[in-house]
Image: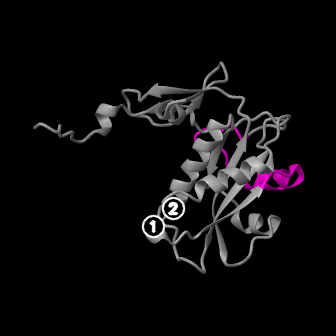
Amino acid sequence: MNFKKLVAQNRTRRKFDESRPVDVKILTELVDIARFAPSGMNRQPLKFVVCANAVRCGEVFPLLGWAGYLKDWSGPASGERPTGYIVILLDKDIADTPGCDHGIVSQTIMLGAVEKGYGGCIIGTVNRKKLVKVLDIPDNLEVLLVLALGVPVEDVVIEPLPTDGKIEYWRGMDGKHHVPKRSLDELLVACYPENE
């Protein structure tokens, strides 16, 4: 698959096939891939917890926020929940801040997941205090993000940004998840050709 297609298929997925669990080896392999990503000042302050255990996943699930724009939807129903999680942590003994490392690593992991036939959601709305207890995370590690992963079962459709400029995603009557995106023309502020 070419890279543009891989990125286009890397949509936020919020519904999964729970009957097809993610193997912990796959989650570990995704972290191993992500460790090659760039890191500010090469500090590499990120640590990870991988979880594919059904009981633990069940404990993690209610600690996450799922879709802010979908006010009448509280998250995936039973049978559609993630079967694996990667928790991204900051080791405060190494750095006070992650800079942008957790963003780079999250995207790297998600691209790797899509390439392997999985999908996921990068979640920042987390009950961190309870998650630390559930996963027995040491005090020197700060929860930054949770990546929810599984075999996706929802279609995500990219839409042009409407004329009113609304960026909110929505679910259609057909069950598809629609995501408006700005056009390339709107994003490019300037473009200087090589032979100007």
Q: CA gap, disc 1 to disc 2?
A: 7 Å
Report the side of 169 relative to 87 (left or right).
left
Q: Quadrant of the N terminus?
A: top right
Q: Position of residue 32 (x, y in %)?
A: 65, 56
Give the left or right position of residue 98, taking residue 51 as reference.
Answer: left
Residue under label 1, please give it.
40
Q: Quadrant of the C terminus?
A: top left
Numbered disc 1: secondary structure: helix
- Could you tell me which secondary element the residue under label 2 belongs to? helix
Residue sitting farthest toward the left: 196
Q: Check the image and name the residue furthest to the top.
A: 174
Depth check: give the residue in front, 96 or 69: 96
Q: Quadrant of residue 105?
A: bottom right
**Residue drawn where x is 66% and y is 18% of the image:** 174
- Closest to the observer, 104 or 30: 30
Q: Which comes before the other along the chain, label 1 or label 2?
A: 1
Residue 134: which numbered mark, if any? none
Which residue in the protein does label 2 denote? Answer: 101
Q: Are marks 1 and 2 in contact (CB under 8 Å)?
A: yes
Q: Say what amino acid the circle numbered 2 marks.
A: Asp
Q: Looking at the picture, how far across and down is residue 29, in whole percent?
A: 69, 51
